[in-house]
Image (cartoon, rainbow, N blue to C red):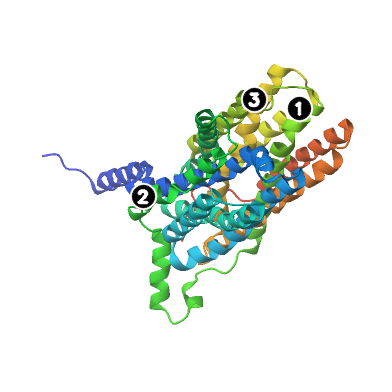
Amino acid sequence: MKVVSAEAQTGNLASRESQGARRITGPEWRSLSLAGLGWAFESYDSFLLSLLLPTLALQFGLSKTQLGLFTSITAAGQIIGGIFFGYVSDRIGRVRTAMLCIGIYSLFSGLLAVAPNEHWFAALRLCGALGMGGMWTAGAALIAETWHASRRGKGGALMQMGLPIGAIIAISAAGLVSNLNDGLAGNGWRVLFLIGALPFFILYWVARRTPESPIWLERQAKTARTATRAQATPASLNVRGLLTAFSFIFFLQYLYWGVFTWTPTFLITVKHLDFVHSLKFVLALQFGAITGFLLFSALVDRVGRRPMFIAYLLVGAAAVGVYILSANPLLLMAAIFLTGFGVNGIFAGSGPFLAEIIGNTASRGFLMGLAYNGGRLGGFIAPLLIGALASTSGGFVLGLSTTIVAFVAAAIVVLLAPETRGKTLG
């Protein structure tokens, strides 16, 4: 009979536990299904508005300035909703908050289909945007607290992939409805918003099978066993972590909105290209983003957050550099793909990084919402600043070049931040 030493038994047990830690569990997959699909349908809603702005201008007789108000209202609602529902998720749980937010944006997206005028449209859009902002916060917190520390980055990256997937769904739905309806005018645009009411009915069944965050449940149990909530909180507010998270998202949002708001106009007016409104332009951008998210998910838990962020910032900066310096259509199409890869793809790490850098606190949902949605200020500033500089070709080049400064600033934030790969959350 072969005798196995205690040391060998311990080693075998550790090996089995290590292998188990590498396996994605059922609760992790279910949390990803809810958070990822919720984020994808939110992206559908967001991208659909940008596709329908020309149609809405004709439908309601609006100027470009008035159309811009719809975008601004959406952004404002997302910021408010992201922060508020982050607070709510700390009180009632991540899963219930996610489903509440999905219900809100589904309801008001469906109601947009019957909006009689621009005033009703703006009011309904604002209400729906509250749920859109809250969905990311609740979903990102759920992923961060449910996925094992050894693969948390993968979970967050796969959730963020809902962003380009939602955009592709919106493009496909718009194309299908346009072909069936001979355009999006008349009732075509209303049908697309009516489709936006479906996520609640689809994801209700997903949410019923999704377990609540074990970390949130543990905190609730501690709160029930103690006299005061303060006694249940093991760590005080990490101000440095919150500021790092806010700064990082601020510069990423500046990059995202600066590049994606003005690159099509820049390529038309300065580079004199005519393909930027074509389907191949949009698809190159979105498939670049999907590639970026997939690669990030495969590598982030192996090599760490900081190396991945720096690599993606370098790719994005190189792509913007090509926009500024080259007029070769082939190079510019490659730059479009790499822009989706780098500037979109870097958001793959935002959820886990925010949770890890903020640290252990009973207010994780609220603070993640505050950092991510407060950081959207960068996205508010970028289009305005670049637009103000873009009155001439030289000014346009200067304006787009400010994104290079943002790339450098984001890299500095990353280099000053600690590496958080494998950090245990509590």
Q: Would you say 243 lies left or right of 136 here? A: right
**In the image, 269: left or right of 246?**
right
Q: CA distance from mark 1 to mark 3?
A: 13 Å
Frontmost of labels 3 and 2 is: 3
Q: Mark 1 falls on what kind of element? A: helix
Circle 3: is it few (<14), some (14-19), or many (20+) Cα within 10 Å? few
Residue 420 picture location, percent across and down: 55, 50
Instruction: Give the CA separation, mark 1 to mark 2.
Output: 42 Å
The percent position of residue 387, horizontal first and vertical second, equals 81, 41
Cβ atoms at labels 1 and 2 below 8 Å apart: no
**Badge 2: residue crowd in 10 Å (few <14, some 14–19, many ≥20):** some
> x and y percent of residue 252 in the render?
67, 45
Residue 335, quarter of picture? top right
Q: Which residue is mark 2?
A: 206
Q: Quadrant of residue 343?
A: top right
Q: Which residue is painted at 16% across and 42% down in the image?
A: 3
- Residue 356 visible, this orientation: no
Q: Label 1: how many residues lie within 10 Å, few (<14), some (14-19) or many (20+)?
A: some
Q: Nearer the viewer, residue 318 or 399?
A: 399
Q: Which residue is mark 3?
A: 278
Residue at image position (58%, 39%) is: 186
**Disc nearer the start of the sequence (3/2):** 2
Circle 1 or circle 3, nearest the eye: 3
Q: Amino acid at mark 2?
A: Val
Q: Is residue 192 left or right of residue 51?
A: left
Q: Residue at the location (41% across, 69% down)?
A: 220
Using the image, tell me which numbered label, if any, was put on residue 267. Answer: 1
